[in-house]
Amino acid sequence: MAKTRIGILGYGNLGRGVELACRQNDDMEFAALFTRRDPASVRPLTAGVPVYAADDLAAHRDDVDVLVLCGGSARDLPEQTPACASLFNVVDSFDTHANIPVHFANVDVEAKAAGTVAVVSGGWDPGMFSVSRVYANAIMPNGADYTFWGRGVSQGHSDAIRRIPGVADARQYTVPVPEALEAVRSGANPELTTRQKHTRECFVVAEEGADTAAIEEAIVTMPNYFADYDTTVTFISQEELDRDHAGIPHGGSVIRTGTTGAAGENTHVIEYSLKLDSNPEFTGSVLVACARACWRMACAGETGCRTIFDIAPALLSPMTPEELRAKML
């Protein structure tokens, strides 16, 4: 069986998660790593994988079937994904929900011009949670949707904080409001604002001499990330961050409540939940499944941008159609 050759751009937590996922899938080969750091300073866990400078991507178009982009959504992916889609089949985890339509359009132009396939906004939300929302809405049109995240570390939000001048390091936790979660699970269909559903907790290491008041103001007023939430900012030392916030857990639930019956007399609750010890390792596993689908679509002659909505479930699985029908139905 020919393996799909995976390239990884960026070797932080998510990049290592993608690498580990490749190890668990016999049809995947981690073929190349690209980094903005000095390639000589980066050693992948997988022996023998070549490490190249990110600036040399174009020279290795023939070495990779699908390039998985592991940068942040705040500043990296809006530029990287369209640029890389002009060279490779690509997968990313762009997760700024409000900006996905624009991101999709920008990537679609480049992928169609280059004859490549790009899968954007893979992961679990957007991603697996998105699929659950579509199925639940299709099945139960008379209802309401709710999404609760956490308690867990958001990589995208943590990255957005680290981009603020004067920030040395940071972790951001998304925390569901317990009363709101229980009200939804009861089938009461409460009307909840963004602020009523979640709070955000930020633990920040400031650079020496940095203006902490300015950093806090930049965080709590940041659109698309913190402005719509009750956000607390706590400044701690690097030692405290490393000791108390080293893990990257996450999870959450996407819930749809609704009714059926002649008079809406029957109430139903659909809930899909995740509890993750490692957000980047799980997200990396989703991206590798998306990379499998991406390569299959490319081999079928498709071009352009796709999201998880456009991918048939069978394309994500390493099983054959016959195996899926025998084991999964």
Image: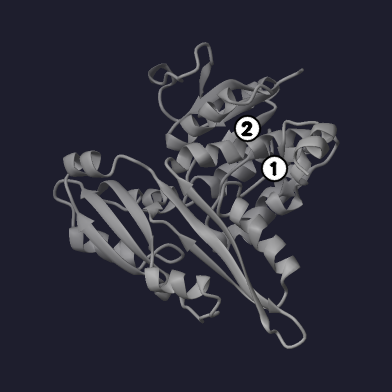
Q: How many labels does the image show?
A: 2
Residue density around tag 2, few if under 14, some if 14–19, many if 20 or more, within 10 Å = many
Q: Which of marks 1 and 2 is nearer the N terminus?
A: 2
| Image mark for residue 139 | none
Residue 284, percent across and down?
A: 54, 37
Furthest residue in direction bottom, as rendered: 263
The quarter of the rendered structure image containing the N terminus is top right
Relative to 252, is 58 above or below? Answer: above
Residue density around tag 1, few if under 14, some if 14–19, many if 20 or more, within 10 Å = many
Give the spatial CA distance, label 1 vs label 2.
9 Å
Furthest residue in direction top, as rendered: 48
| Image mark for residue 67 | 2
Labelled pair 1, 2 in contact (Cβ < 8 Å): no
* Residue ID for mark 1: 118
The quarter of the rendered structure image containing the C terminus is top right
Task: Report the amino acid beneath label 2.
Answer: Leu
Relative to 219, is 42 above or below? Answer: above
Q: Residue at left 37%, top 61%?
A: 175
User: On the picture, is 313 further left or further right than 22?
Assistant: right
User: On the picture, is 184 further left or further right than 159?
Assistant: right
Q: Can residue 307 be seen in this view?
A: no
